[in-house]
Image (cartoon, rainbow, N blue to C red):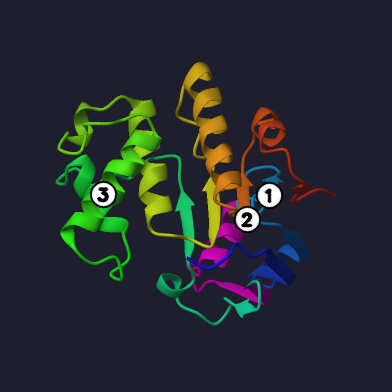
Amino acid sequence: MNAPQALRLEAVSIRLHGRILVGPLDAVIAPGECLTLMGPSGCGKSTLLNYLAGTLPTVFEAGGRVGVGEVNLTPLPPERRGVGILFQDDLLFPHLSVGGNLAFAMPAAVRGSSERRARIEAALAECGLEGMTHRDPATLSGGQRARVGLMRTLLALPRVLLLDEPFNKLDTRLRGEFRDFVFGHARRHGLPTVLVTHDEADAQAAGGPMIILGAE
């Protein structure tokens, strides 16, 4: 795996029907650092994440450069950007086991069933879910499902991590635990991270810079 690199946003702007929704925005997010995006609903927070991931709907007009290190991500399709994203819902596949969900994310370059099994077992041990490879995701608690979702994202070996309010559906105790778990992993893996949230406690836990969108 390549050494972690900073995520750079250069003059990024997004328009909807001619109206500026986001930007122009410049930011540098260092490896392991988390940039928090806050602001009222409809101000473009999740829209900006879509642009970073390469999934912005065509109804929007966007400009500017998104890069990781020397690599310009802007012209690349989503599957080549190396951008991992966590949403409010864990989006685990119900027809696959826990191990099957994790295996689904692994790059094709990880060959051999023994190597793939070893990575799955290591990921489950890392998140405290040893021995759950063959479990049905429906039998897991909300906190356990959230951890599996994160490990699935990390097993894809992303260069960037995007967080679209992934803590919202957890109760207060689990929210704090999972928040620390996510940010801890992002720092250890050196992932530049962008968080969208309405919760100031999330921003404080992220510990990085903040941008408030939609502010007058």
| Residue type beneath disc 3 | Ala
Q: Nearer the viewer, mark 3 or mark 2?
A: 3
> How many marks can you see?
3
Marks 1/3: CA–CA distance: 29 Å
For residue 192, which numbered disc appears in the image? 2
What range of the chain is rendered magenta?
Answer: 46-67
| Residue type beneath disc 2 | Pro
Mark 3 highlights which residue? Answer: 118
Earlier sequence position, callout 3 versus callout 2? 3
Callout 2: SS: loop
Q: On the picture, is 12 further left or further right than 140?
A: right
Callout 1: SS: loop
Q: Are marks 1 and 2 in contact (CB under 8 Å)?
A: yes
Query: Looking at the image, is 62 positioned above or below residue 152?
Result: below
Q: Residue furthest right?
A: 216
> Residue shown at 58%/77% (left/top)?
74
